[in-house]
Image (cartoon, rainbow, N blue to C red):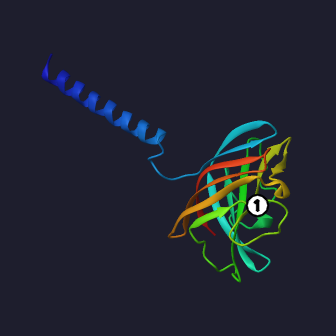
Amino acid sequence: MRNYERANMKGLTFLTAIVAVVVFAGACGLMGGGSGVTVTYDGNSESVEAKDSRVFAHTIGDSVAHTFVIANYDLPEKLDRRSAFKSAKEDGQKRVEFTIIGDKGTSENTPIKPGEYPARVGNVGSPAGTSNGGKIAFNKEGKEDSEGLNLADMKEGKVVIESVESGTVKGTVDITDGDTTIKGSFTAKAG
């Protein structure tokens, strides 16, 4: 074997090893970033890979609420409850939403606190420190349709906020009402 052939083989072996490490890290979730949630509704289960993932604040009663929105399309620049509604306008577009409720006596300016927010179970209003339902929105026949977790039938689950750093929130969601489920990890930008 000639020297340049040996050098090419070493380069090819090294490149193959790098590709294998990257594929392994990606498969194990070690590459970081992004959001990927699995949604189950109407007997179907599918993944929603985030192209845009954000969280916005509003109030419910006398508590701050943070609604997370994970979409496989670009969300409206100014995201709030009104602008997110009916934003899945093209075939294949999907959006997942879920909300956590902060402490009593807090406002829209109150930052998200890391921790566990158990599912609000039963028809009990919106107690502080809980996750408060969710929704899967999708484009069907040229317009947005949705499936919501029936709040009165929430069975179990939780949202865990793992970290809040430099306007980025990371966590996991696993909530269900028995028929509709939202489950996975997320990374969302505040605002």
* Residue at the bottom extreme of this rendering: 105
80 sits to left or right of 116: right
Relative to 8, is 50 above or below?
Answer: below
Q: Inspect the image, locate mark 1, and give the three-letter code of the amino acid beneath it.
A: Ala
Quickly name the residue at label 1: 84
Residue drawn where x is 68% and y is 50% of the image: 73
Relative to 160, is 50 above or below?
Answer: above
Of 190 and 171, nearer the camera is 171
Locate the N terminus by quadrant. Answer: top left
Locate the C terminus by quadrant. Answer: bottom right
Residue 88 seen in render:
no
Residue 128 seen in render:
yes
Q: Position of residue 171 (x, y in %)?
A: 57, 58
Residue drawn where x is 43% and y is 36% of the image: 23
Hey, which quadrant is residue 64 in on the image? bottom right
Q: Position of residue 190 (x, y in %)?
A: 61, 68
Relative to 6, is 99 above or below?
Answer: below
Q: Position of residue 28 (x, y in %)?
A: 46, 41
Residue drawn where x is 33% and y is 36% of the image: 18
* Residue at the top extreme of this rendering: 1
Of 8 and 68, nearer the camera is 68
